[in-house]
Image: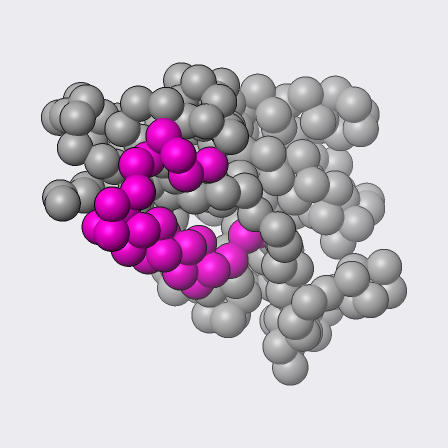
């Protein structure tokens, strides 16, 4: 039995599906796999693909709420987004809808390269951005330390999508556990190698979201973290 493991972003999944409609594919997916057109049903994926969803798109609105809690007086909240991300349009729609609901001004800052990230952070003051949300994106995961350093240099509170950012010195992260997602990916891959069909393996959805706070960074930024965030945090780094 042969199986393709497609992880590292939606482009990887699309490439795997374009390459074959017969070889089983096990993937990690950041968006709603039905809405994105990867499968017809969560419970019965059909076709040759099944997946572990990390629900990155669905958490955009929640990250906006957290940013508002951290910076309640912010004139604007920024959203750093990679236009090369396959989920970009969905992420943009989610942040704009959430902003309208909350009556919050949001500035979308585009960055698909390291130099563009530098430029986006340099423009924060110009746009009166009081807090920033970083899109869940494979490229941003690759430059974790650079983004954390840029946030510290500009003294801006940032909400990231993965625990790894908070561990590296980022202020706050909220999202699914990549470790757990990859563990489930391995389990599904093993089941297919043992003879299971992708169509018989339901799309796995997250059962838990991690809220990780770096209190040391909060103190460095002079931020009094709201009690509501402290009591909800799954992990506090001191």
Vertical comparison of 47 with 194: above or below:
above
**Residue 68, quarter of picture:** top right
Vertical comparison of 92 with 127: above or below:
above
Does the image show residue 148? no
Residue sitting at the far front: 195
**Residue 39, quarter of picture:** top left
Residue sitting at the far bottom: 238
Q: Position of residue 116 (x, y in %)?
A: 34, 40
Task: Tally the marks.
Answer: 0
Q: Position of residue 21 (x, y in %)?
A: 19, 22
Q: Position of residue 33 (x, y in %)?
A: 45, 27
Q: Nearer the viewer, residue 81 or 26?
A: 26
The residue under the point 25% across, 37% down is 25
Q: Nearer the viewer, residue 36 or 135?
A: 36
Quadrant where the image shows the C terminus: bottom right
**Residue 230, quarter of picture:** bottom right
* Horizontal relation, residue 50 to residue 131: left or right: left
The residue under the point 46% across, 27% down is 44
Does the image show residue 169? yes
- Coloring basis for residues: one colour
The residue under the point 32% across, 35% down is 198
- The boundaries of the magenta stretch are 175-202
Vertical comparison of 6 with 100: above or below:
below
* Horizontal relation, residue 58 to residue 88: left or right: right
Q: Position of residue 168 (x, y in %)?
A: 46, 70
In magenta stretch: residue 197: yes
In magenta stretch: residue 148: no
The residue under the point 54% across, 33% down is 57
Q: Main secondary structure of the magenta part?
A: helix
Q: Nearer the viewer, residue 74 or 228?
A: 228
Vertical comparison of 74 with 210: above or below:
above
Quadrant where the image shows the N terminus: top left
């Amino acid at each position: 039995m042969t199986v393709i493991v497609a992880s590292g972003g939606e482009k990887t999944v699309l490439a795997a599906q374009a390459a074959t409609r017969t070889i089983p594919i096990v993937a990690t997916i950041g968006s709603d796999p039905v809405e994105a057109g990867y499968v017809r049903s969560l419970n019965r994926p059909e076709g040759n693909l099944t997946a572990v969803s990390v629900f990155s798109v669905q958490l955009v609105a929640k990250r906006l709420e957290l940013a508002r809690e951290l910076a309640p007086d912010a004139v604007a909240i920024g959203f750093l987004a990679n236009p090369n991300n396959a989920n970009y349009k969905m992420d943009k729609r989610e942040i704009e809808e959430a902003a309208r609901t909350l009556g919050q001004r949001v500035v979308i800052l585009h960055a698909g390269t390291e130099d563009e990230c530098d430029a986006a952070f340099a423009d924060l003051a110009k746009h009166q951005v009081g807090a920033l949300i970083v899109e869940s994106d494979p490229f941003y995961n690759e430059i974790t330390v650079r983004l954390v350093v840029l946030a510290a240099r500009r003294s801006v509170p940032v909400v990231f999508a993965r625990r790894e950012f908070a561990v590296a010195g980022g202020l706050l992260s909220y999202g699914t556990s990549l470790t757990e997602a990859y563990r489930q990916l391995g389990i599904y891959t093993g089941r297919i190698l043992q003879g299971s069909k992708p169509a018989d393996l339901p799309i796995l959805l997250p059962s838990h979201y991690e809220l990780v706070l770096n209190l040391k960074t909060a103190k460095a930024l002079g931020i009094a973290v709201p009690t509501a965030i402290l009591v909800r945090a799954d992990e506090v780094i001191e």
